[in-house]
Each structure stands twice: as C-alpha cells, then as structure tokens.
Image (tube, rainbow, N blue to C red):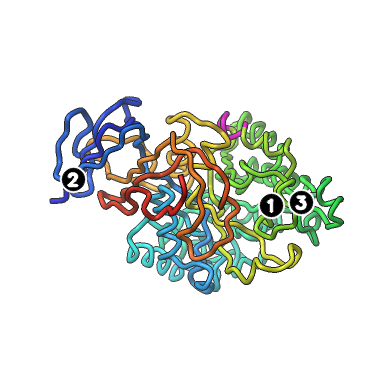
Amino acid sequence: MHDVTLRNGTVLTGEGVMEADVRIVDGVIAGIGEGIESDDVIDCTGCWVGPGLVDIHAHLREPGEEWKEDIASGSAAAAAGGYTAIVAMPNTDPATDAGHLARYIAERGREVGLVDVFPAGAVSIGRAGEKLSHIDDLLAAGVRVFTDDGDVVADAGLLRQAMDYIAARGGVIMQHAMDVGLSRGGYMHEGTVSSRLGMYGIPSAAEDVVVARDLELVALTGCRYHIQHVSTAGVVELVAEAKSRGLPVTAEVTPHHLMFDHNAVAGADPVYRMMPPLRSELDRGAVVEGLRSGVIDAVATDHAPHASHEKDVPFEQAPNGVIGLEWAAAVVLTTAGLDIEVFFDRLSARPAAIAQIDGHGGPLAVGGAANIVVFDPHADWTPNSVVSRSQNAPYLGKKLKGRPRHTILRGTVTSRDASSLAATT
C-alpha cells in the first residue's frame, strides 16, 4: 500500500478552502483533515494544494519531429510545471486526422506515465483545410477536441460542416484565429515596433475578423467553440458579447501573451517570435483583465518546442513558438495575481471542462483520484534551465512569483521538491 500525506497545506476542497492535511492511499484521496499520519509526509506549509493543472494546448511533436520534443520529454516538462493532464495538438507529421494516430499518442502518454495525454484531432485531412478529417474514427479513439491548430480553418463552408457534425456528437471545435490574407508575410504585431524595425506586421484585425465570422457560425450550428491563444482586446470584447448572447463559446490565453507585449521584440530576438504575435500593451492589459474577470476561461500554454538551430537564425527566418509548460503557473500568478480559487479555476477546472477531461480539475474530495499539484504562491525565483528538450523559453532569467513544488498523478509523485525545476531562488 502506497500511503502519503500532504501536511499543512491550504487546500481547495468542494467545501471551500481550508488549512488541512491530505492523505493519499493507492492513488485515491483517503482523507482531508488535521493530524493525519502516513509513512511518507510531504510538508506543504505555506503552499496551495489543489487539482493538478490541465493544459488544453500543447505541442508534443510526436510523431514526426521528435528532435524538438517527444511525449516523454514533454510529459516531464508538464509534470515539472504542475500539470497532470495535457491535450496534444494534431499538427504532428503525419497530422492526427485518424483514429490510429490518436490512439498512438494516448498510448505513448500512458507508457510514459507522468501526465495523462489526450490527443486532439485535426478538423481537416492533413490540416489542409479542404476535406473533413476522419471525425467518427477520431471520436471512437476518444478524441473530443478538434482543431487545425497551426493554421486557421479558413473555409467557412468547411468549418460550418465540421461544426454541424461535431455539435451533434458532443465535441468542441478549437480555432487558431488568424486570417490568412491579413497575416500573410507578417512577422510581428503591426504597430510602432514593426514600423521602427521596418518589418511587415500583422494587425489585430487578423484575429478579430476570424472570431467575428466564426461566432455567426456558432449561432447557426450551436457547436461548442473555443478560441485559442487570444491576444487582442477586440477578441476579448467579442467573447464577452458572445457569452452575453448565451453562445457556447470559451477562450484561452497563453502565459506569453499575459507577460509580454510587442516591445519585447524590439531587439529582434527570435525567442519572441510567435503566432499570434505579441501585441500592444493595451491588448496585453485586456487579456490579463479578461482572465481575471472570467471572460477568458483558461490559461493554455501553446507549448511549442523548436530545436536550438531553428531559432538561432534572424528573426524573419525563425519558426513561431515558445515553450511554457514549466513556468505557466508562475507567469499567471506574476502577471494576474489570482487568488487560490480563481487560480485553480482558470488552470485546472475550466480547462478540464472545456476539453471534457474526467478525473482532473475538480476540487479535492475524499474518494477522488489523487491528481494534485502543490504550488507555493510565495516563492520568488528566476528560472535558468529547462526540462523540455527544447530551449526556446522567453522566461529564462525573468523573475517570477510562485512555483510548483510537487505534482502527483493518481498518487504517484511525478515531480517532488521542484527537483526538476533547476532555478535560482
């Protein structure tokens, strides 16, 4: 029998927040109270103890680009960051557009055993935006989330067809909202920095117009619709208005769009090249406030690993994307200052509900699965190394507030004493 107690934490339970011990026996929460004894005791004094974090937008690169990341290295990075479940995006090689590919990804996640890995399915075959993917086959493989992430589903007719089909089967469409024509040839946000650098920019409207169009299709089809990596004040307003109409719409924001604005690219460092690009300070403030208010439902990392040689090129030639699984929770606390209940709502509960992930995200309760993170909201630290296979992290050398200390998946400690988060404090 494996018996461990998390001692003296501030615990999020179904009855509210309380100072308590949490006993875990054979992967299940066996008790929540005071003075609980076990053979293995983990001191959680001053820490928040709550449901393991859930990331609904991560690129694990397997199959096809394992030199950047694979399911094993990505899972290790996720566990180090406090995650117990992640949704793997389908822009693999080949694209995850059929059931056997989804089954492979889920099975590799189980073999690694550090986090639960849930594959997303492509909306279109090969993510080419021309014909629907094998949706029934993907559903039979357990897929509930569909996206062509990395590319927008540009064809409104195809998107409507997908929405009709997926709505009838209880799934959700996630959209990479970026108009092809307005973003073509752009490297960064269209604004003062792009003008100063003499680089083509991508206007905020490139994101806004896709979301505005798609919301009309949501009203037409009733499909659950989720907006990925929101970066503009305009989309925050559109989401708020759609929710007021009762449309089944949710949205996410990334840690990097919470922390940085387009001034970060003034030095043309390729680590800050991403899609959507870092926007204005007005936009950054809007997404922070949207997360605080709940207009934006969730934080999702858009963890996008790239090999060092791919990023060690001029800004214009670098691929888009940054990694973020290891620091997301700290960035959220640093930038948005959420309390314990809102913190776990945005990083655990709502993401799990959006992606229809059972056994994760709920407040701790006796008899429930022991998928838990211990998070120290008082830690001041500066990360200086990574667990991920890739190094394209904009947070290295940045002072952060809050740090995952321990991560537990069904009673097994997958990261302890932040040992896999090499950093200075």
> Along the horizontal axis of the image, is 346 left or right of 200?
left
Residue 276: image tag: 1
**Camera-side residue of 261 and 31:** 261
Q: Which residue is mark 2?
A: 40
Q: CA distance from mark 2 to mark 1?
A: 45 Å
Q: Which residue is painted at 80% across and 58% down in the image?
A: 181
Q: Are marks 2 and 1 in contact (CB under 8 Å)?
A: no
Q: Main secondary structure of the magenta part?
A: helix
Give above or below for 360 relative to 238. Answer: below
Give above or below for 51 relative to 70. Answer: above
- Expressed as whole percent of the image width and height from the top left, the position of residue 296 reads 58, 37
Q: Earlier in the sequence, mark 2 or mark 1?
A: 2
Amino acid residing under circle 1: Pro
- Expressed as whole percent of the image width and height from the top left, the position of residue 139 reads 45, 59
Judge depth for marks 3 and 1 and give the one in front. Answer: 3
Q: Which residue is mark 3?
A: 266
Instruction: Give the residues in magenta.
Output: 289-294
Residue 120: image tag: none
Give above or below for 235 relative to 63. Answer: above
